[in-house]
Image: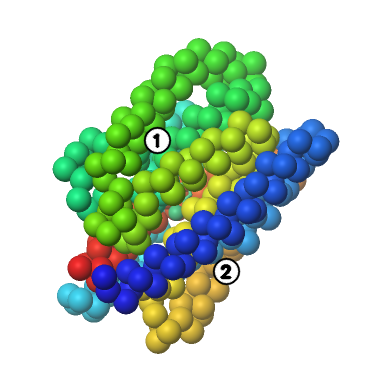
Amino acid sequence: MTVLTEQLEARDLTHRRWASAVTLIACASALWMPALSLKGQMIIVGLAVGLLGFPHGALDPLVAALRSADRSELNLGRFLGLYIGMALAVVLLWALSAPLGLALFLATSALHFGLGDAPRSRVSRSPWRQWARVVAHGAAPIILPAAAHPGNVAEVFGWLLDLPRASVEPWLISARPAALAVWAACVVTGYFGAGRSEASPRRGIQRGTQRGIHGGLLELGLLTATFVLLPPLLSFAVYFCAWHSVRHLITVDAVLGPGLRARGLVVGVGVLAATGALVSLGHLAASDPASIESLTRSLFVALAALTPPHMLVTAALARRVESLSE
Ligand SMILES: CC1=C(/C=C/C(C)=C/C=C/C(C)=C/C=O)C(C)(C)CCC1
Ligand SMILES: [Fe+2]
């Protein structure tokens, strides 16, 4: 095992403990919390995504630079052109057809979440089992809140699509049985029997770190409870910030090493400021910038726009971790 793998494994364990504690506290508080309006939920999500969500993508240029250091110098202009071009293409797609934009956003998000969160086995000879786990982990943050809280989710989707909740909710309710069945089938396929065949503590599961199959199942169980118990925007904030973003930041930090940490901070703050300024400028073009509907739309369209280029960088990061772990 390399130093990087050992370091990642230790940090991953610490992270999972902390994230589990935060998630359990959030779930417990849902039991006594007075029902929160969507507006109240959006304020919390906006703050959480701004403080922890966006920063996990802010180091993308540095991650890309690291990768290209092996080959040629990173052409920063080309990188930024590609990144911003992809983001603008997504914004354009939303402007042309919001339903298509939303569908693509949900599908790419599920893939991105699953590739980052599902435990992967080096020794597994069954790629379908791994893919089933990718779908199980990746689709959970979308399918479960929509299934458990169709009213709330329909209202937010309605804000994104400029449609009344009443015309979105029946869609969610009619898609629910099939979506839940596919999700459950993926959980069973991905995990049933995997403990025995893939979870050998020595040669086992890894996603760069050696996260065991049982850890993966425990995490999925805890998050399932969160998506069912908490109102949808709050469970999203818990998942996206405490699990997804922190996990990514830990990997980036380990790969950068102490030498590049300071530069990472400078790049991160710069990119965040630029992204914040661009998103705010775009938001000002909204017809009613002060309304909760248009604030929600700007936040999620910005997330949607950054997702495809961020996925490319994340894939490069995963390849780098893999090559450094060999
Ligand atoms: C819009 C919306 C949802 C989906 C959010 C998604 C899909 C976010 C994806 C973020 C990504 C991919 C960030 C990249 O790192 C929920 C939570 C189902 C509930 C209600 C409204
Ligand atoms: Fe991400």
Q: Looking at this view, name the residue that lies furthest to the bottom.
A: 259
Image quarter (top left, top right, bottom left or bottom right) of the N terminus: bottom left
The crowd level at tag 1 (other Cα within 10 Å; few <14, some 14-19, many 20+) is many
Amino acid type at mark 2: Ala
At x 32%, y 69%, the residue is 5
Image quarter (top left, top right, bottom left or bottom right) of the C terminus: bottom left
The vertical placement of 301 against 47, above or below, is above
Q: CA separation, marks 1 and 2?
A: 34 Å
Position of residue 295 in the picture relative to residue 116 (left or right): right
CB of mark 2 near ligand 1 (< 8 Å): no
Instruction: Where is residue 16? Give x, y as percent.
Output: 51, 56
Classify mark 2: helix, strand or loop. helix
Task: Tell me which label, 1 or 2, sits earlier in the chain.
Answer: 1
Residue 45 shows up from this direction: yes
Q: Which residue does the numbered mark 1 point to in the structure image?
A: 136
Position of residue 74 in the picture relative to residue 107 (left or right): left
Q: Which residue does the numbered mark 2 point to in the structure image?
A: 273
Instruction: Where is residue 32? Give x, y as percent.
Output: 81, 37
Instruction: Where is residue 121? Give x, y as percent.
Output: 26, 50
The vertical placement of 303 against 326, above or below, is above
Classify mark 1: helix, strand or loop. helix
Q: Quadrant for residue 127, please give it.
A: top left
Q: Nearer the viewer, residue 265 or 259?
A: 259
At x 30%, y 34%, the residue is 193
At x 17%, y 75%, the residue is 71
Q: Which mark is residue 179?
A: none
Amino acid type at mark 1: Ala
User: Which mark is nearer the camera, 1 or 2?
Assistant: 1
